[in-house]
Amino acid sequence: MPEKTLFTSSTNLPPLAARMRPVQLAHFAGQEHLIGEGKFVHNMIASHALFSLVLWGPPGTGKTTLARIIAQSANAVFYELSAVSASVKDVREIIRKAASHQQMGKKTLLFIDEIHRFNKNQQDALLHAVENGDIIMIGATTENPSFEVISPLLSRCRILKLQSLEAADLITLVNRAMKEDIVLSKYKIKLPENVLNFLIMSSGGDARKMFNTLDITVQLVRGNDPGNIKFAITKENIQTALQERALLYDKDGDYHYDTISAFIKSVRGSDPDAAVYWMTVMIEGGEDPLFIARRLIILASEDIGNADPQGLVIANAGFQAVKAIGLPEGAIVLSQVATFLASAPKSNASYMALRRAKKAVRDTGFQSIPLHLRNAPTETMKQFQYGLGYIYPHDKKDGFADQNYMPEQGPGGILYEPKELGYGKFIYERLIKCWPDRFKK
């Protein structure tokens, strides 16, 4: 029996995402903040102008499509390179061709996909041509360009941030594909609202992923029956087509930094539910649990500090426990630590004291240490009055000696001002008892 094939008459056609790629701005979905009336890209295309750009955004948001529409609108010669496979030689060859185009009055637009993967030498090869206007460069990246693109090249580009597509945008694209695509328009496909919503949700705002999922789903449902033109799609069909969890998390991508930011801010904001949610996103996405544990240690000092000194102890114990047992059980430990720190009273007083001290030292330099605070292990040092006048606090009733510990040209203000929260209240009252005028403005 011959082996059954998944594909139908569309086998030799490009994927659905390619077939539905718009060629004019009117059919471009989403990114209204860039392409809407009076916005930057809209004005740029309307005026047939060209500027070097870096398009920064998640996968499937239209970076490549937008670059092609811009090139076509300005009647420019369009070249496309993938930074994964292109070399410096490829870049220089296009720059050479651009010089010829320029002599004929033609502009050259070079689109570089995944420009963040270009090394410094490759980016340097572009710099002179972009600076002189020999080529217009549009780079696409899913990474923060300020981290991945060299500053001289970045300074000659306008950075445009693309957003994940909204559900309404994706629904518009699905409906358009059903009516206009050369393949799907031939079928009578029933796509219930709940199934459509599941397809949209599983795409994570990525139009390409949505189209690919729909394309494979249709092929799965039709099977090898070329006469099967009327059928319904179910949630189970889409789940089969997905073949993997629909998580956007990328340990090396921008989403990684956004997720850890959301996690930290949730703990800082005393929301244990949100803290556990974002922590789980990271763990399910394959994040190193020790990375999470380290961030919790930092947070315990930066955002809780002496409001609950046990926070640092528990965070450090959590790190050691996760290191010892790993996943999956380590996630239980991380959940305990995250919820404890999220629920603890918050104070950044220690962190702010450090920042103020750093500023004082950088502003005034290293100050002379008062003689009474200097170490005097020898008679010679004592002769120079090292240690003279120092009062040993433990000789006093309350373990406190009223003496100056700052240099003569000290910071001139309070560095550590504990909040009257949790254990910080006890510290505040202790300092007031020792230094009655300490916190007077």
Image (spheres, rainbow, N blue to C red):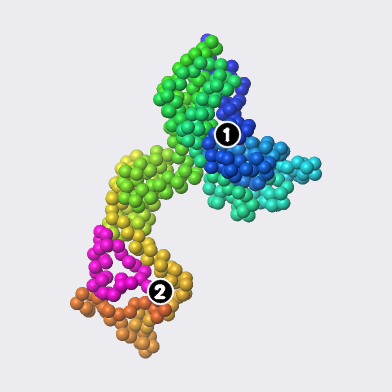
| Amino acid type of the residue that numbered disc 1 sits on in the rendered structure | Phe
- For residue 196, what is the image quadrant? top left
Is residue 404 depicted above or below 202 in this figure? below
- For residue 100, what is the image quadrant? top right
Which corner quadrant holds the C terminus? Answer: bottom left
Q: Is residue 82 visible?
A: no
416 magenta-colored: yes
Q: In percent of the image, x 42 and y 28: which residue is there? A: 198
- The one nearer the camera, 220 or 381, is 220
| Amino acid type of the residue that numbered disc 2 sits on in the rendered structure | Pro
User: How many neighbours does mark 2 have within 10 angstroms: few (below 14), some (14-19), or many (20 or more)?
Assistant: some
411 magenta-colored: no
Residues rendered magenta in the picture: 412-441
Question: How far apart, in angstroms, are the residues tagged by discs 2 and 1?
Answer: 57 Å
- For residue 194, what is the image quadrant? top left
- The one nearer the camera, 256 or 27, is 27
Q: Is residue 167 visible?
A: yes
Q: Which percent across, then down, holds residue 211?
A: 52, 28
Is residue 241 depicted above or below 367 in this figure? above
Q: Secondary structure at mark 2?
A: loop
Compared across the picture, whether 26 is left or right of 204 comes to right
Q: Main secondary structure of the magenta part?
A: loop
Q: Which percent across, then down, holds residue 361?
A: 44, 72
Residue 411, which numbered label? 2
Question: Which residue position holds label 1?
Answer: 28
Is residue 273 depicted above or below 299 in this figure? above
